[in-house]
């Protein structure tokens, strides 16, 4: 008998999910869910983590919980197979975080490269005295510790996330090892599961910038209407050296090709063959490698490729958008999924919490423990 295989992953509810989330995580989660290879799958809406840098904007977090839940269900997460829950509703997570804090030094937190980058991005400055500079909220600084609580409460051993989350998983592993070495074998050390397709590791924005971000306005959202998708695709950044159709083009660092890498399948070349029939020249491609070869050789215009990408994206996103629209008409059902999922997660967390308290010797009032405690104290005072 092998040990149980348990997955936990999640997202901060700070906006609607976009196609970067889809290829980087959502699509994979649905595959994992339907593979039948896992005993339990938890997907968490990390509202408490979102609040670590949005403390002054709780309404934004509150509104985006439903957006993220709609995106999850629209992509095919099935509440019968996957426990979808809201982080803040499982108070044991906060409790675990407080105890794990004792196992991590400030210096160790300061070395976390993802947190470092996020601090810069958010304009947090460590010198609070300087005018107009926000200090780093302590909760934000400690969120990698809270993430260890998220992962360990259900004894997850597989955490499917993007590469930016690698430092969080490493931090979790360190906490687990330290906890178990001090208090005895209690927690489970998780493994990271990175996206399998390199193009999906990080999908660039439509403008070619490294990251899709709402504030940069370079995202295609799962909920976008067909016209919006088309407009965004046709306006995409491509290869700036590919000035004339005859010029050889570059596929590396070209977002249109990165998107194709992430989304297109061989079938799409047959289905959308008409995209490559032009007024001046026509082509027949069977797969992405052939398309790339021709682009690199020269003679293939960006418009043709963008049109093809648009067809591929429309084909992929249409069923998701339609399911989302249907769910938007039944929000009571969506909230019920979250409520039931949160209750189920809380039950599991309570069991782990009891084990943790026992291991840490802070289970004073567990059955039988108090009597033993009194007896041992009495001996001391005889
Ligand atoms: N930090 C993750 C993100 O920004 C969200 C998250 C919170 C998470 N807790 C987690 C991911 C635990 C995986 C496991 O997307």
Image: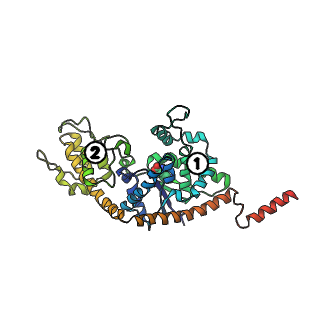
Residue 307 rendering spot, x and y as whole percentages? 21, 49
| Residue 82 makes an appearance in the image | no
Residue receiving disc 2? 256
Residue 29 rendering spot, x and y as whole percentages? 41, 58
Circle 2: element type: helix
Residue 330 rendering spot, x and y as whole percentages? 37, 66
Is the residue marked by circle 1 packed among few (<14), some (14-19), or many (20+) residues within 10 Å?
some
Residue receiving disc 1? 174
Alpha carbon separation for disc pair 2 and 1:
39 Å
Quick check: 240 left or right of 108? left
- Tally the numbered discs: 2
Is the residue marked by circle 2 packed among few (<14), some (14-19), or many (20+) residues within 10 Å?
many
Q: Residue at x 73, y 67 (%)?
A: 368
Of pointers 2 and 1, the one earlier in the residue sequence: 1
| Residue 228 makes an appearance in the image | yes
* Residue found at the very far top of the displayed protein: 130
Question: Looking at the rendering, in which quadrant would you find the C terminus?
Answer: bottom right
Q: Residue at x 44, y 47 (%)?
A: 163
| Viewer-closest of 165 and 350 | 350
Residue 264 vertical placement versus 345 (above, below): above
Residue 121 rendering spot, x and y as whole percentages? 45, 39
Q: Quadrant of residue 267?
A: bottom left
Q: Quadrant of residue 350?
A: bottom right
Quick check: 263 left or right of 131? left
């Amino acid at each position: 008998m092998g040990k149980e295989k348990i997955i936990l992953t999640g997202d901060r509810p700070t906006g609607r999910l976009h196609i970067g989330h889809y290829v980087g995580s959502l699509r994979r989660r649905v595959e994992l869910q339907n593979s039948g290879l896992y005993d339990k799958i938890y997907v968490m809406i990390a509202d408490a983590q979102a609040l670590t840098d949005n403390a002054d904007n709780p309404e934004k977090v509150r509104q985006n919980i439903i957006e993220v839940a709609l995106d999850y269900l629209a992509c095919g997460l099935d509440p019968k197979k996957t426990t979808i829950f809201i982080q803040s509703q499982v108070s044991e997570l906060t409790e675990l975080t407080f105890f794990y804090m004792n196992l991590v030094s400030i210096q160790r937190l300061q070395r976390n490269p993802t947190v470092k980058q996020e601090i810069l991005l958010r304009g947090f400055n460590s010198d609070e005295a300087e005018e107009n500079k926000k200090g780093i909220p302590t909760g934000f600084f400690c969120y990698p510790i809270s993430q260890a609580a998220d992962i360990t409460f259900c004894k997850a051993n597989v955490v499917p996330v993007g590469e930016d989350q690698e430092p969080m998983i490493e931090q979790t592993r360190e906490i687990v090892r330290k906890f178990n070495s001090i208090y005895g074998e209690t927690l489970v050390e998780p493994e990271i599961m990175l996206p399998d397709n390199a193009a999906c590791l990080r999908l660039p924005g439509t403008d070619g910038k490294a990251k899709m971000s709402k504030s940069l306005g370079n995202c295609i959202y799962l909920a976008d209407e067909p016209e919006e998708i088309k407009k965004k695709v046709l306006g995409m950044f491509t290869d700036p050296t590919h000035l004339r159709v005859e010029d050889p083009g570059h596929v590396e660092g070209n977002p249109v090709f990165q998107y194709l890498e992430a989304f297109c399948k061989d079938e799409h070349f047959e289905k959308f063959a008409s995209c490559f029939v032009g007024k001046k020249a026509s082509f027949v491609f069977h797969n992405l490698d052939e398309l790339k070869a021709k682009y690199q050789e020269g003679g293939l215009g960006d418009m043709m490729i963008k049109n093809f990408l648009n067809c591929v994206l429309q084909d992929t996103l249409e069923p998701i958008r339609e399911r989302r629209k249907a769910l938007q008409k039944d929000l009571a059902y969506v909230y019920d999924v979250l409520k039931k999922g949160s209750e189920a997660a809380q039950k599991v967390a309570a069991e782990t919490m009891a084990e943790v308290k026992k291991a840490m010797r802070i289970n004073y009032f567990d059955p039988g423990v108090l009597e033993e405690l009194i007896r041992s104290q009495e001996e001391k005072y005889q």
